Image: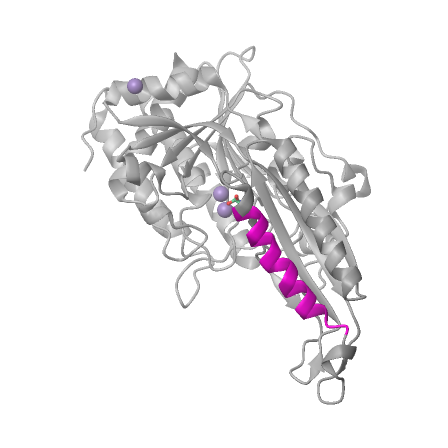
Amino acid sequence: MAKIKGHPQEEMLAQYGERMLLALEWLATFGADPEGGVTRLLYAEPWLKAQLALIDNMQSMGLKADFDEIGNVYGKLQGSNPSLKPMLTGSHIDTVKNGGKYDGAYGVIASMMALGYLKAVYGAPKRTLEMVSFCEEEGSRFPLAYWGSGHVTGVLSLAEGAGLADPEGVTLLEAMERAGFDIDQGQLHPAKRDDIGGYIEIHIEQGAVLEFKEKQIGVVTAIVGQIRMTVVVTGIPNHAGTTPMTMRKDALAAAAEMVALTEKMALAEGEPLVATVGRLEVKRGTSNVVPGEVEFTLDIRHTDKRKIEDFRAELISRFVEIAVRRELYIDTVEHLNALPVAMDSGISAEIEAACDFYGYEHIRMPSGAGHDAQLFGPICPSAMIFVPSRAGISHNPKEFTKPDDLIVGFQTLVHVLYQYGYG
Ligand code: HGY
Ligand code: MN
Ligand code: MN
Ligand code: MN
């Protein structure tokens, strides 16, 4: 196990590190899928039970813990100097469908245990330290991502999100109310927090750079921008037996051409641009009916905003050409347009200093995954700590990070929070 040194209570830090590992396994039981992996969708029962359990846990550690109005959970270690703006650390509690047990969860658990350790060993800090378990980041249930951090940073309001429906037709507002978050109309606009002194998020890398370069910590320089949208292709449903091939308005054949073109154009553009069709649905699909309507998602990312917009414009114009040639209709809806965001060099330097304090190997690197930190970047100094992902696998039950690497990240986070809280 990683040698722990530097803090007066090395044994205590080791204990909290072990508790952090156990708590990660505990959190993974909320929404554990029978075939492996974890599914915790916004406002669903596993999600609610996990958030309530985190509140319980933090209250038993002596932290002030509760929900905000939409279901984000905060844990607070109150500082003695109110003139110092709080440092916020955390990540998201929701997951993709059948995802791994570290994406988001590691940042939530490591932050919770870090505040618990600092309180137990050092008592009240000068600067308030807060942890947050954001209610939703992935966009797995509703066509809406970063709902938790978007609310806190004033980027997303209920007015925009309330009517969005999940695949079962349940709206965000209905799901909120069923989970017990009764938002009165007056709260349709979020209470954007402007009191945050800085935001730090520890997260698994979800890529293979750290493993390949044999480094323990990634200090994130920037987070990619991303556009997420839905494309709907409409043709004419018809009989599979009596409709000649030359007379079809086949929405799926057209969509298949568009999906193949997306990959071809992304390969031609080259790294770091990535474009993904993650979900495709044949509406009322039946084996003996020529598909009349198909809906698919697009996720386009790059570190340069201009490149994303230019790629999207070119891709959609090519989609229109396909639709016109096949005499079909095409509609597009944009759900997310997150800017690429640079991380704060000051906090990043503190992270590197913490690594040097312990002798941990670290590198600076961009993030190809989106994170809540990119919503905070525009409103306060924000930084991210990465730990390695085995074979870079994520959004997959096989997502894994070695316990030693989780401990190294945890210690680095504790050290940085100590500097900001007590330094
Ligand atoms: O999709 C992402 O980049 C993140 O994991 N939500
Ligand atoms: Mn994540
Ligand atoms: Mn994710
Ligand atoms: Mn160094």
Q: Decide if residue 81 is on the left or right side of residue 354.
A: right
Note whether 10 is above or below 125 in the view shown.
Answer: below
Query: How many marks can you see?
Result: 0
Q: Is residue 262 magenta?
A: yes
Residue interval drawn in magenta: 249-267
Locate the N terminus by quadrant. Answer: top left
Residue 276 can be seen, yes or no: no
Label the magenta part by its dominant secondary structure: helix
The image position of residue 19, as x and y in percent, is 30, 41
Residue toward you, 273 or 410: 273
* Image point (23%, 19%), residue name: 6
**Quarter of the image where the C terminus is located:** top left
Q: Nearer the viewer, residue 402 or 211?
A: 211
Q: Write down the quadrant of residue 60 in the picture.
A: top left
Q: Position of residue 351 (x, y in %)?
A: 38, 22
Q: Splitting the image into 4 quarters, where does residue 243 fall? A: bottom right
The residue lying toward the viewer, choosing from 87 and 264, is: 264
Q: Is residue 175 visible?
A: yes
Q: Is residue 150 above or below residue 328?
A: above
- In magenta segment, residue 122: no
| Rendered location of residue 412, percent (x, y) | 33, 27
Which residue is painted at 67% across and 44% down in the image? 312
260 in relation to 182, above or below: below
Q: Is residue 224 left or right of residue 101?
A: right
Q: Residue at x 27, y 19 (%)?
A: 356
What scheme was used to colour the molecule? Answer: one colour
User: What residue is rendered at 37% in x and 46% in y?
Assistant: 392
Instruction: Locate residue 41 relative to residue 324 in the image: left or right.
Output: left
Q: Is residue 329 above or below residue 359?
A: below
Left or right relative to 386: residue 142: right
Q: Position of residue 81 (x, y in %)?
A: 51, 11
